[in-house]
């Protein structure tokens, strides 16, 4: 009888062990909001790519509205005096944005994969090429090129995606990429004897690697 009882007890323990499943603690919205409030809803970050590669300064303020969305603005300042190697360059820009966070919001909210819409208000310098020629083929003339630098104010609308990581100390790292289209047209007007080509881009690229801090 004792052997039978021990055998039955062993079988019961074995069966229960086989049916044990891994239990994951899933935080509800109230718990996420509590952790989110402890960490802070304000964030400042700088773009490392612009600072190192482009000799420019790009700082972003982001207000985490709730664990699932945020809004803010980026300010870009070109610190380089020598832009002769490129056909165009932003001199200054302000880029407001609104973000939606999806999938992995983590414990803090405002992290993981996101999609955003943005507008960009920028001051830009770009080259304009002028090709001068004699429109009458029966008369001799001298064809020549000239390149002049122009400046203009531009407005663009666009969208992008990205990924953000946040640690328990509130430090953040972000990768993002977006594309916008300029709404203003700064094409030069050609005329007889002169062709005009503007080298201002039609699209605006937004992206980089940002590191920041929540408070």
Image (tube, rainbow, N blue to C red):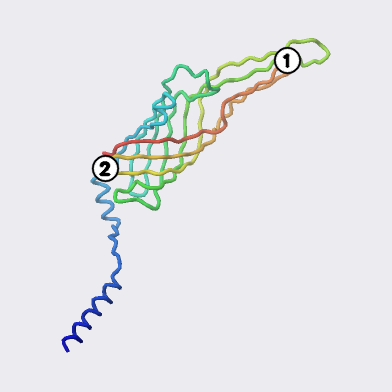
**Quadrant in the rendering for residue 131:** top right
Q: Is residue 39 left or right of residue 63?
A: left
Element under disc 2: loop
Residue at screen point 29% across, 42% down: 41
Q: Earlier in the sequence, mark 2 or mark 1?
A: 2
Say which residue label 1 marks: 133
Residue 182 x %, y %:
54, 33
Q: CA distance from mark 2 to mark 1?
A: 64 Å
- Say above or below: 1 vs 106: below
Say which residue label 2 marks: 40
- Nearer to us in this view, 56 or 158: 56
Element under disc 1: loop
Residue 91 x %, y %:
46, 23
- Say above or below: 40 vs 103: above
**Quadrant in the rendering for residue 171:** top left
Q: Is residue 201 left or right of residue 173?
A: right
- Nearer to us in this view, 137 or 163: 163
Quarter of the picture containing the N terminus is bottom left
Residue 179 x %, y %:
51, 38
Marks 2 & 1, CB-CB < 8 Å contact: no
Residue at screen point 42% across, 29% down: 50
Q: Is residue 204 left or right of residue 79?
A: right
């Amino acid at each position: 009888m004792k052997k039978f009882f021990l055998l039955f007890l062993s079988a019961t323990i074995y069966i229960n062990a086989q049916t044990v499943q891994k239990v994951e603690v899933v935080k509800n919205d109230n718990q996420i909001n509590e952790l989110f409030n402890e960490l802070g809803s304000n964030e400042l970050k700088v773009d490392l790519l612009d600072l190192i590669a482009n000799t420019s300064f790009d700082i972003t303020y982001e207000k985490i509205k709730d664990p699932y969305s945020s809004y803010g603005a980026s300010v870009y300042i070109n610190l380089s005096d020598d832009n002769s190697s490129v056909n165009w360059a932003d001199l200054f820009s302000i880029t407001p944005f609104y973000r939606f966070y999806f999938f992995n919001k983590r414990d803090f909210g405002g992290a993981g994969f996101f999609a955003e819409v943005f507008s960009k208000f920028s001051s830009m310098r770009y080259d304009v090429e002028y090709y001068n020629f004699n429109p009458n083929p029966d008369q001799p003339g001298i064809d020549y090129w000239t390149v002049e630098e122009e400046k203009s104010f531009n407005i663009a609308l666009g969208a992008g995606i990205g990924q953000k990581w946040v640690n328990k100390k509130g430090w953040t790292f972000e990768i993002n990429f977006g594309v916008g289209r300029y709404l203003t047209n700064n094409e030069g007007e050609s005329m007889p004897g002169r062709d005009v080509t503007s080298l201002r881009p039609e699209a605006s690229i937004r992206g980089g690697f940002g590191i920041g801090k929540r408070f």
